[in-house]
Image: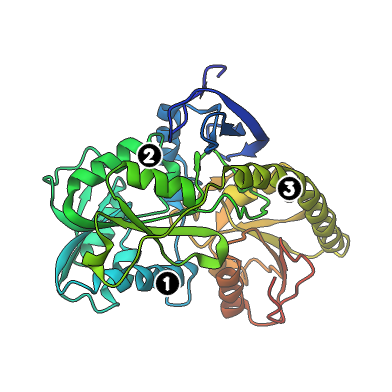
Amino acid sequence: MLDRYEEPGCSICGASEYQVLYRGSQSTGSSLGDVTVSVAQCGACGFIYNSPRIRVDLLAQYYYTSSVASGQVYRDESAQGYYPRLNAERARSLSAFLSARQAGRLLDIGCGSGGFLDALRGCGLDKWELCGLDPSATACEKARAKGYRVEQACLGDEDFPPRTFDGISLVSVLEHLPDPRAALARVRKLLKPDGIVFIEVPNVLQPDLSVSGYFSLEHIQHFTQASLARLMRDCGWEETLSSQVQKGHAIRLVGTRRLSDWGDWHMSEFPDDADEAGRAVRHYAIQEARFLKHINQQLRTTLDAWKRTGRTSAVYGAGIHTASMMSHIDLWYYCDYLLDGDPRKQGTEFLGKKIFAPEEMLALGIDCILVSSQRFQEEIVRRIHEIAGPDIEIAICYNPSAQASGEQA
């Protein structure tokens, strides 16, 4: 579709002039096919955002229908899983503020099945009412089963009355929204005048190198501390404080009209970092090409050895990472099976390959596995070892020579 892209104005200042800093291709493994990802910098204020980008209506359809969209990603909710550990860290950061009040009501926007709410409940906020908002019917049903009051809707379509909440959280949400300013204006209406907002977004100053790409069709706004703080203050939270930054790759900010209402906190200063953001994106473009070349060389060495020796092999991961890998390497030439831990995917096909449950790997005679993941590779390796024991050979995309001895990438 020639008209599937649009050119939005800057989300911070509204200007229409921009310069493209990065352009790449993303294999979605969905009806969208391959898409072009263009990352631009506003010519007026220096904010980084996607333009041209996939049209908002097509992006919404992708979120609702594609099994590889971020909202459909299968999450291991065991204590050792990636997300429970990350949510516990986030909850400690926010509860340091919420504990200033004995009771209150908090809304988690984009709550999913309630993982972040679970972590907050574990931080001693016994008298706080924890609520959620999410467009996914399945996620809402799971969150309600845990006892949370959850509304199935997108922000702006919900039925909560104005000034309902003492606190609102948006974790990994704002970077997905076509109009973050309008979203935060709505959040401001839902929040009590002295309420507090907690926002976490990826930090564009620290983009991770990945086979599936840091810049994608989903993340269409790219914040720094300064640009996020500016937006928050524009939307009514006059005092903004930098919270914990997870390994430099995620920005966490809290905002309210008066920080002293929430403890002994003082407003942070955020020097302009637009030039630094532009340099970070340009540097990423250079590093990504080198990174992909290295990964392909290392991975082909392992896969060629498996093929040459007649090993029965599998790819673990039926998602965007594998779709991206396929644009570089024909994985089905090398690997016999495809595994995924998501029960919803098992028995279906992905990129023409039937998906098996990991519990079937012994019956299938699989003796070596390529873990096609970055964020979840630790928990996937652990799951493989639980099923197949310590001797099965494992290659990890970010350290393809790592074996099943427990060595981590």
In the rendered image, which quarter contains the C terminus?
bottom right
The percent coordinates of residue 4 (x first, y second) are: 51, 22
In the rendering, at what x and y percent does residue 150 appear? 20, 55
Picture coordinates of residue 158, whole percent (x, y): 19, 42
Q: Which residue is mark 3?
A: 288
- Rendering coords of residue 312 (x, y %): 74, 64
Around disc 2, counting alpha carbons within 10 Å, would you say few (fewer than 14), some (14 to 19), or many (20 or more)?
some
Q: Is residue 352 visible?
A: no
Q: Is residue 159 above or below residue 341?
A: above
Rendered image: mark on residue 180: 2
Amino acid type at circle 3 is Glu
Quarter of the image for residue 102 reads bottom left
**Which of the two residues, 280 or 405, is positioned nearer the viewer here?**
280
Spatial CA distance of label 1 from label 3 is: 29 Å
Which of 49 and 238 lies nearest the eye of the viewer? 238
- In this image, 128 relative to 45: left or right? left
Q: Which of disc 3 and disc 2 is earlier in sequence?
A: 2
For disc 1, the marked residue is: 89
**Image-based side of 74 in relation to 153, left or right:** right
Amino acid type at circle 1 is: Glu
Q: Residue 14's mark?
A: none
